[in-house]
Every structure is written in structure tokens, then in C-alpha cells.
Image (cartoon, rainbow, N blue to C red):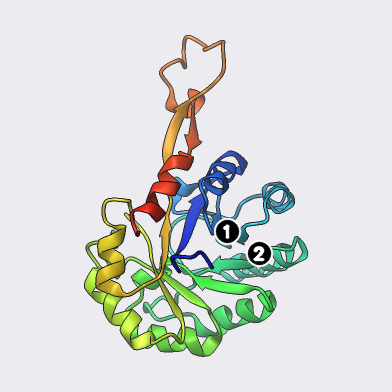
Amino acid sequence: MPDNHYIIEIATSDFATTNSAVQGGADRIELCANLAEGGTTPSFGTIKRCREAFSVSLFPIIRPRGGDFLYTEDEFQIMIQEVRLCKQLGCDGVVIGLLNADGTIDIKRTSTLVNAAYPLGVTFHRAFDRCQDPLAALEQLMEIGCERILTSGQQPAAPEGVELIAELNRVADGRIIIMPGSGVRKENIKMLAEKTGCTEFHSSLRGKEASKMEFLHPAFKESGESYMNNAIDAEEVRALRDALL
């Protein structure tokens, strides 16, 4: 663990952004595709190449699609296979989140995924922020064997949910890690640390950079989809930790 005892997790969207996050000193990577949709499972090739290239702790998200966290049986079977693949590829953990239609934690299937992942660590992601009773869910996820909960305190961004995050961390009392995420920036991370007592923080620091293409097709030259790529500034990652000092 770093000298200042804080852990910085960065959500990345491809190999290039993962490389930047690692260069910036990220302690852990939540490896995703489609961060604009909240993150979906990255490809086999992306996970494999990132595992080969980086020694940093690597947690791919296991989410077969964007949208809600109520999954069909077919989607759940996909998730099981993806967890097994992550284990075979030598990942350090996975990130999951499943709910029932009534807003409770899908305990049975979450437990199945935790068992399938073992001995990998398991983070329960911000599906938690859509659950009906966060304190009940906290106890259930501890019992299931998740090692951390990523949460914005059931608000769109962590600074808005800081009071609930602090309560969750107090109730957890070291039995499970509470990790604030969503809207975590260098401007507010110290406040979040002081008010919640949390020591792990999650941020995506999403940015864009212009394509290096020399030929820009006239019909698409203004298209961000065509000529803007996802980017993370390594210095912004470093600044997150510096803000905690």
C-alpha cells in the first residue's frame, strides 16, 4: 500500500487509457469498455494485453450491456463465463453488480459470481446506488464475500452523497471497503477523505484527445466519434493522490 495509505483506482476504457493511468501512478485499474454507458465488459484481447503489459492490480468490470442491473438468465451465464476468463487471464479481481426487480441485491446470483471468481477479489459497483436499502445491502454484500463497494452515496456524484458514504463507512467498520466514486476529482478528494474516513477512491478522469489521423474525410471531419479518442492525462491521476497529502 502507498506510504500515505490511500488507494487510487482509475476506470479506463481501453489499452491506451490504462497505460496513461498506470503511468500516472494508479494503484488499481477498473478495466471497462464503453465508459459513456457506465462501463461494460472489455474484450478478451484487451484484458489479456493489459494483464501482460501492466503489473498493477487489474479488475475488469463484468457487465454484458449498459442500462439497468436486472439481468436475464442468458446475460447471467455470460457473466459467469467472463468471470472465469478473467481468472484464467490472471486478473486480480472483478467488478460486478446485480439487482432484483424490487431494488434488492440479487443475493443468489451475486454469490454465485463471487464463488466463481474466488480467490479473486470482488467489488460490487454502483448498482449499489440503485438499491432500495443501502444499509441492508451493505450487510448482505459483506456476508456474500464482496471485498468492497463502489458508491456515490446513492446520488449522481460522490460529493452529493458524502453523508451516506460516511455512514456506510462507519457501519462497515473495516469489515468491507467503502470506495467513493463518481465525480471524484482533485478539487474534492481531500474533502471526501476527511468527511467519510474512506481510504480508497475511484475516478475515471475521462477526457478526449484529437485523432492522429492525417486524412480527415470531409463528411466526418467534425465528428467526435470519428476523430476524437478517449484519453486520460497521467498528470491528472498523479494530482488526485497529491491532493490527499
- Is residue 94 visible from the viewing direction of this image? yes
Q: Position of residue 232 (x, y in %)?
A: 47, 40
Q: In this view, does 148 lie to the left or right of 192?
A: right
Mark 1 lies on a secondary structure that is loop
Among numbered discs 1 and 2, the one appearing first in the sequence = 1
In the image, 56 versus 218, the foreground residue is: 56
Quarter holding the C terminus is bottom left
CB-based contact (under 8 Å), mark 1 and mark 2: yes
- Amino acid type of the residue tagged 1 in the rendering: Pro
Residue under the point 37% across and 77% down: 103
Q: Name the residue under label 2.
A: 78
Q: Where is residue 131 in the image (x, y as percent from the top left)?
A: 36, 75
Q: Where is residue 110 in the image (x, y as percent from the top left)?
A: 55, 78
Q: Where is residue 148 in the image (x, y as percent from the top left)?
A: 48, 75
In the image, 49 versus 85, the foreground residue is: 49
Quarter holding the N terminus is bottom right
- Is residue 133 visible from the viewing direction of this image? no
- Amino acid type of the residue tagged 2 in the rendering: Ile
Disc 1 residue crowd, few under 14, some 14–19, many 20+, Cα 10 Å:
some
Q: Is residue 179 left or right of residue 153?
A: right
Q: Is residue 94 left or right of residue 5?
A: right
Q: Name the residue under label 1.
A: 64
Marking on residue 154: none
